[in-house]
Image (spheres, helix red, strand yellow):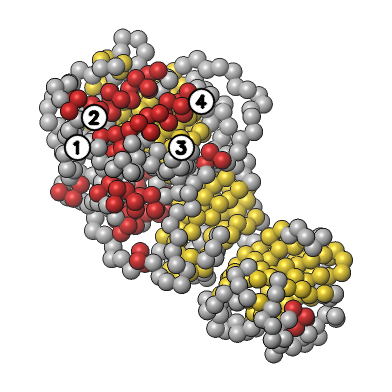
Amino acid sequence: MNPSAGFTASNCAPFSTTRATASGDDGTGNVAPNTQDDNLSTRWSGPGKGAWLSMDLGRSQTLSGAAIAWHQGNTRQNHFTLSTSEDGATFTQVYAGTSALTTAAQTYPFPNARTARYLRITVNGNTVNDWASIAEARACGAASTPTPPPSAPTTDSGPALPRLPYLQSVGTSSAIVAFRTSVSCAPFVRYGEGMDLSRTATAPALGWRHAVVLDGLSAGKTYSYVVEACGSVTGVRQFKTASLPGTPVHFTAMGDFGTGSSSQSKVLALLGQPARHGEFLLTLGDNAYTSGTEAEFQSNMFKPMASMLRETPLFTSPGNHEYVTDQGQPYLDNFYLPSNNPEKTERYYSFDWGSVHFVSLDSNCVIGLASASRCTLAAQKNWLIQDLAATKQPWKVVFFHHPIWSSGDHGSQLKMRREFVPVFEQYGVDLVLTGHDHQYERSKAMKGEAIATTSGIPYLVVGSGGAHMPAYPGSKPAWSAYRDNTRSGYLDVVVSGGTLAARFFATDGNVYDSLNLTKALPAVDPEPAPVTSTSMDAPPGPQDDPARQPAFLHEAPAAPADTPESVADEPDPVDPASIGQP
């Protein structure tokens, strides 16, 4: 077969194809060689998602991309990948995309030139049906000057995504980029270390909500990424992977923030500054007021936090307001969190970052808001004991919603104290972060039911992220080191070597409370064990019918929760064993 004289495509010098094969055809004469006959009226047609066409160039060539003329390309947008191979057996994906609505040949440049003998086009259906149908296809030769890598777009273009990218389950070797699209497609993410964007990860299926896994990452490195989805391209953003032990860790934390209110906006205006938001954010529950619905997550959390969440990995814990709707199911549907407990649930989990071991608990499972079919105190407590006993990290931080020590409107959660404080103390937890009461409060170092005389654990309530702050019901107790129910804000924490420094920032940018912990650390192993991403595996999330628009695209925006009534809580369940305790 000769290079086409009549088939033309811009920015493509076509190679000769010695043989074209396919995964199958329609049985009516639309076979693979038709894609090489320089005749746009003939075609290859193959059934089913994943149908492929391979071109054998006869010997290894330097490829710069591929040119494809799609059959009925003006009415069907095709979702496809391009892969190359030297032996015809093992193929490596180098491109993923969606065709434009045109019958003209389209050239798809590779991020970098590839040396290969075989080029394969795999079609994952189109916007009309599951068939693959190609009129002409060619492998393109490298130009006389190297093809430059894709540029890094600085601004978003194309149709606006109903939910912009947000970072989930970021570990030492993998990360998840989650987002939503207004049309069903199979998008992809270009990414790489530093400003490189030469690597590609593709969504596993057509759909409307996507969680694309970036793997093969290195610990403690900065990565850039761009999402290309259904005609939209997001501007480049960066994030940092989890670091190995011995490296400083900078994170932030806040709870009771998902209001969509002016108070939340003031906190985000400060926290959202790149120099302030740290490597990742811990949330301490009540992520979406008033009832944790799908619309409230979109309007009161993801929309106001969109710019920050594109750059800052998010590790969450559920609050009581999430449990108002279907026992927290919308919370689980919106996040892609580690599922490293025996039940493979995202309700509670742990992860490492640098020399710190973090544990997220679901206090709703303890105090009686969760049904036994969703989670139980016994399962979570047994897992926590095993998890804390197994970690080798010198620093341990636990976060959840209902506070163990609080002088706020709800007060201390005595069942959480009774069940978990002995575990925290036995296994050397250094810091406990909670929310629920709309205030900032730091306890003195506590041991059991009293102020510690030597070593103890400080318990912080950081329910100051944007919800209305009520008056204190009583005077400041002796165990309370600092409390503030007038200033919204967040907690900033830096762990470096044997020092943990925490500061409470209010919306005026000033620090109103600080805490410093120190400890002697063991020597860091100069050759740490290999780190895998298995502990960061997240469930795939809900699957929508790719042919039917999901309900979330049609829901009206939720109202801001900017009144005392909209963020008010039902009384916490009463624990009979705690009646009469202080």
Given the current orientation, which residue lies at the most extreme top position?
453
Counting residues from the start of the chain, the first of labels 3 and 2 encountered is 3
Classify mark 2: residues with Cα within 10 Å, few (<14), some (14-19) or many (20+).
many
For the residue pair 80 and 507, the one nearer the viewer reads as 80
Residue 351 pos. (x, y %): 48, 35
Label located before the other in sequence (3 or 1): 3
Residue positioned 57% across, 41% down in the render: 533
Residue beneath the point at 17% across and 33% down: 574
Q: Does residue 390 show up? A: yes
Look at the numbered disc 3 and give the secondary structure of its residue: loop
The residue that label 4 is drawn on is 390
Q: Which residue is mark 3?
A: 341
Residue 186 falls left or right of residue 569: right
Q: Name the image quarter holding residue 115.
A: bottom right
Mark 4–mark 3 CB contact (< 8 Å): no
Q: CA distance from mark 4 to mark 1?
A: 33 Å
> Above or below — where is 215 with respect to 497?
below
Discs 4/2, front = 4
Picture coordinates of residue 417, whole percent (x, y): 28, 25
In this picture, is 296 found above or below 206?
above
Q: On the rendered image, what quadrant is the N terminus found in?
A: bottom right
Spatial separation of the CA atoms under disc 2 and disc 1: 9 Å
Q: Examine the rendered structure and indicate whether residue 329 appears above or below residue 570.
A: below
- The amino acid beneath tag 2 is Gln
Are dots 2 and 1 in contact, CB under 8 Å? yes
Residue type marked 3: Asn
Which of disc 2 and disc 4 is earlier in sequence? 4
Q: Which mark is residue 413?
A: 2
In three-dimensional space, the C-alpha distance between marks 3 and 1, rounded to whole angstroms, equals 26 Å
